[in-house]
Image: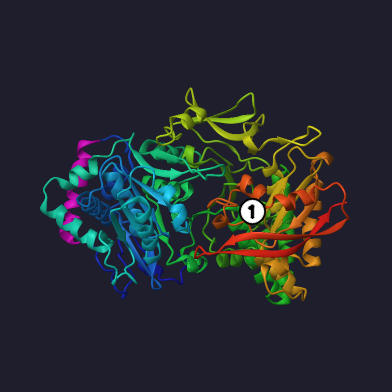
Amino acid sequence: MNASVLSQNFGAGASTHAGARMPAGRCSPELLKLVNELVERLSIESSEEPSTLLACLAHNAKHEGRRAAFRERDRGIWHEWAWDEILADVLALAASLEQHGLNANEAMLIIGDNRLRLYLSMLAAMSLRAWPAPVYSDVPPNELLQYSQLGNPKVAIAEDQEQVDKLLELRKQTGGRPQIIVYHDPRGLHAYTEPGLESLVNLLEAGRARLINEVGLAHRLLTSAQPEDFAVLMHSSGTTGKPKGVPLTHLNIVRGVRNAQAAGSFTRHETHYAYLPMAWVGDFVFTLGGGVVLAFTTHIPERQETILHDLREVAPTMYLAAPRAWDAMLTRLQVGIAETTPLKRWLYGYFMAVAVKIERDKLKGRSSGIAQRAMRAMGEVMIFASIKDYLGLSHAKRAYTGGEALGEDTFVTFRALGINLKQFYGQSETAAMSAIQRDGNVKLHTVGQPLPGVEVRIAESGEILVRSDSVFPGYYENPIATAEVLKDGWLATGDAGYLEPDGDLVVLGRVSEVVYTASGERFVPNYIENRIKFSPYVRNAAVVGAGRERLCALVCIDFDSVGHWAEQRGFAYTSYAELSQLPAVLDLLQDAIKHVNTVLKPELRVNRFVSLPKDFDPDDGEITRTRKLRRNVIEERYGSLIEALHAPNWEKQSLFDLDVRITYEDGRTGLLQRSLNLRSMD
């Protein structure tokens, strides 16, 4: 926490800020005493290292006791829960969920943004040997059906009225499931009369009473889970069809976290910030995996709109963000610098040039001179420390990105600022992390070395294979898909890559996306797309050219960064569509693609491109909720446009009239019509 933000109230054992109102429904001293006596007995009975998340939770309650486990911001105030309080509430929720029909080997839907009691509900399901199945909060009602068909979910936990409405609509489609809908935020729900609606607060209170009244219940709930039990049911991205169920066991999660700890990627008692989607495996492994196994202090922002503000107050020691989030953070920094005083702009430009030069030398294995290092130290005092405080990363000892490649300029800039940013590689099937860059051995083109406890080899086909205790047991109720990826203990990741002589792993892209041009040149579209997206002005790109004479690109601008660029230069626009077709913007995109072409073989250079009048949108089915392209959908929706780009005879600049159907947030559809400029790189 920044010193200015109530730091005096953030010592271990504090329950909330001095003078602040206590959140409703804190557990009683009687229940805390019962829980503490229980974990004391269990610690005497077992000396083994905890192998389930529930056992780790009990270990923390015993050995960390009143240390801060979670802090959640509510109406501007950070409220704190100690480990014994967290365990008590998890067991109370489990006691109530059991009475409401949640059984072993059943899924429990979780839908909403990050909230403490949603996380606790996930742990509560595990104590019943059931498993949470988190769903992205922005999934529309018509897509929710496919997530409800795995694990027979009779119970669902919803954050608020919006999510309750989706679940009630789901009931109509499934003939009654989920029967029980538990809501966190009661606003707007008081007039609802549908059966099976329950308040999470009421469940919590009923469960606390049951724990106190039923002797032995707490012990049973705490000790039932086994290492081989499912801890969570994630969902694959569904880039080629219906998402598959990806179960991860307690053993997968615990071993995965221990592997990361052995690599120095996690340390005990991290200050963690939980703001990423709860349905993403990265959030689950970092927040409930690392958070519980290694006793992090996890901070939860008030709402999505306050993430950046709350981040400054938290100042985490470890920070995870997707590549696009790092790009957005850099854009915000650059906008702030552009709007500051001339002196500060000069200081930033001068010291940043020195720091970037030092960092690039370091990445190439070269050392810097004494004079450069002295100037870098002066820059830290005069400007870099303030910038890191502004970004909320003043205490970050480790920062990570994963999921796709991060732009070189973005990566180097943050490392030059003194932020220890590193890339990691993994997927849901490997509990998020398989390889990671190590301190002192960071390279721009690799994702680092396999974690301790993880084996990686390359198949003859060039596919990356992984073997570890963190690898999942197989797709849920899908033996055919499981047999395709699990062979002799090795997971076929579906990614193409190679190992360098020093053991570093290079990821090229998806094996299924390795295609050939008409002349037989082999290429991976995603590899080229990622490099186009390295430009801060490009949010999404799709490269098409399989079986064709040339490669062409559909490009989606980054509305915020391009909009700011245009405003600085006095270009007027009223919408995304209008901005995307400005000649100056097309020139900007052409320069970005021209830069990418310089590092590609002549046969694989992007020859033509078009700037689309809209971004790829998951509601239109063009990308997944994790922002991965659905190529079959894109090639179908924009088929006539793609044909126009590949037409053999056309002028250097040509026009194309696009008609494409779009889906609005409320589910309504409309038709977007726009004349697009097709550009040649010749």
The N terminus is located in which quarter? bottom left
Give the colour scheme shown: rainbow
Label 1, residues with CA under 10 Å away: few <14, some 14-19, many ≥20: some
Front residue (pair 49, 619): 619
- Residue at screen point 71% across, 66% down: 562
Q: Is residue 278 covered in magenta?
A: no
Provide the residue span drawn in magenta: 27-46
Answer left or right for 252 relative to 670.
left
- x and y, in percent, of residue 65 in the image: 28, 53
- x and y, in percent, of residue 612 in the image: 70, 59
Front residue (pair 124, 142): 142
Front residue (pair 258, 648): 648
Q: Which residue is mark 1?
A: 415
Answer left or right for 487 relative to 418.
left
Secondary structure mostly seen in the magenta stretch: helix
SS type, badge 1: helix
Q: Which image quadrant is residue 496 in?
A: top right
Q: Amino acid at mark 1?
A: Arg
Answer left or right for 663 relative to 102.
right
Q: Is residue 390 visible?
A: yes
Q: Is residue 505 visible?
A: no
Count of labels in the image: 1
- x and y, in percent, of residue 423 in the image: 59, 46
Front residue (pair 396, 542): 542
- x and y, in percent, of residue 183 in the image: 32, 62
- Residue at screen point 82% across, 48% down: 647
- Residue at screen point 22% across, 52% down: 100
Q: Is residue 39 covered in magenta?
A: yes
